[in-house]
């Protein structure tokens, strides 16, 4: 469930954005579309794109004890993805994101490399207020479905189950996004909560815990629409239940920092690159990842 600290941070960002001045035109088109490469800018009608994400574990957040410790094993992941977005109304858009994951997992002398599709995400966005069109901050509602097209943990193969790429359950999620621009400065906040459907695992009904994501971002738009953005993202999964009983210690938390650069190649083509790493604060019960990504997209007006 959403943590009080993350909710307060989002509320502070929203309150601060109420006092914005006039916005530069290009900043209004960079915020959400720069943070998530599949989102359309205000003037775009649809787009297609591809992303390559490379990551490696560099530590572990244990279930209890110190926040951070060296990883017992290591994962190296290569994740190419395809995405597409279409505008379905003047203020609405729908996006689909389909990743493929290659994992090289090492634990002691054992090494496995597997490639498999991951879970596919379908998400919609409706902007009640577009950033820059009023003195109020931009405000959008989000809603999505995650389809269990990946391989869940109970169906992994090999000694290390390196082909596990999904959670095995349908997820429905909803959230809000607020954004404001001050000249060429962009401020952004997003909060999303998700619920998973139950599923049978080895004869028992299992339901994963509720999921929450909170993102705060700030950046600057330079001449030529080049944008530099910094983000902090906190994710949290509650404990799962197995056979109707809560399973303590099965949830996790993670906090990630990222630096993103968005560079337009033309009016309809742009590149987005990022460097990211999980950091110890608020981390618990999962591996810590660091890596980089690059995406290329083509849009149409």
Image (tube, helix red, strand yellow):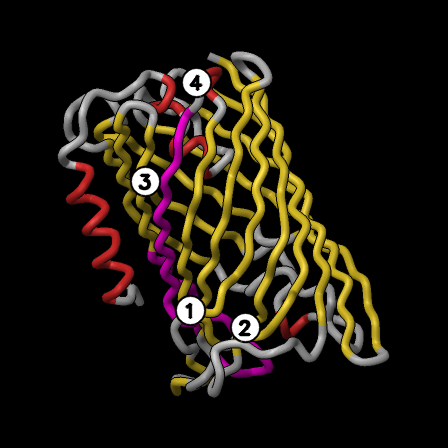
Label for residue 44?
4
Question: At 59% from the left edge and 37% from the top edge, which residue is drawn?
Answer: 273
- In the displayed structure, 142 sits above or below 7; it is above
Task: Identify the disc placed on residue 3.
Answer: none
Q: Look at mark 3 in the image and give the residue it sits on.
A: 188
Q: CA distance from mark 2 to mark 1?
A: 13 Å
Q: Nearer the viewer, mark 2 or mark 1?
A: 1
Judge the density around disc 3: few (<14), some (14-19), many (≥20) Cα neighbours within 10 Å.
many
Question: Can you identify the residue that label 1 sits on?
Answer: 281
Cβ atoms under marks 3 and 1 closer than 8 Å: no
Measure the C-alpha gap from mark 3 to mark 1. Answer: 21 Å
Q: Is residue 206 visible?
A: no
Q: For this rendering, which residue is in front, 270 or 297? A: 270
> Residue 56 in magenta?
no
Left or right of 287, for residue 134: left
- The residues bearing labels 1 and 4 have C-alpha atoms spaced at a distance of 38 Å
For mark 2, does the 10 Å Cα neighbourhood hold few (<14), some (14 to 19), or many (20 or more) residues?
A: some
Contact? badges 2 and 4 (CB < 8 Å): no
Residue span colored magenta: 193-221
């Amino acid at each position: 469930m959403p943590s009080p600290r993350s909710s307060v941070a989002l509320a502070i960002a929203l309150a601060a954005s109420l006092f914005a001045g006039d916005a530069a035109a290009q900043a209004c088109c960079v915020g959400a579309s720069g943070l998530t490469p599949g989102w359309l800018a205000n003037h775009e009608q649809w787009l297609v794109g591809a992303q390559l994400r490379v990551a490696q574990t560099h530590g572990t957040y244990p279930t209890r004890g110190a926040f951070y410790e060296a990883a017992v094993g290591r994962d190296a992941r290569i994740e190419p993805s395809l995405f597409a977005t279409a505008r379905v109304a003047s203020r609405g858009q729908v996006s689909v994101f389909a990743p493929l994951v290659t994992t090289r997992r090492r634990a002691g002398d054992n090494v496995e490399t597997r490639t498999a599709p991951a879970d596919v995400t379908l998400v919609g966005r409706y902007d009640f207020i577009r950033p820059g069109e009023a003195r109020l901050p931009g405000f959008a509602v989000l809603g999505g479905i995650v389809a269990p097209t990946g391989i869940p943990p109970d169906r992994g193969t090999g000694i290390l189950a390196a082909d596990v790429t999904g959670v095995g359950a349908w997820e429905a999620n909803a959230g809000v996004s607020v954004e404001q621009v001050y000249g060429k400065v962009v401020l952004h906040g997003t909060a999303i909560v998700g619920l998973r459907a139950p599923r049978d695992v080895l004869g028992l009904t299992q339901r994963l815990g509720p999921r929450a994501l909170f993102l705060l971002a700030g950046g600057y738009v330079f001449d030529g629409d080049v944008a530099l953005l910094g983000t902090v993202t906190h994710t949290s999964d509650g404990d799962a239940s197995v056979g109707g009983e809560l399973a303590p210690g099965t949830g996790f938390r993670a906090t990630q920092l990222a630096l993103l650069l968005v560079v337009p190649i033309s009016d309809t083509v742009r590149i987005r690159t990022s460097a990211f790493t999980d950091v110890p604060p608020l981390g618990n019960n999962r591996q810590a990842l660091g890596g980089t990504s690059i995406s290329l997209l083509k849009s149409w007006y």
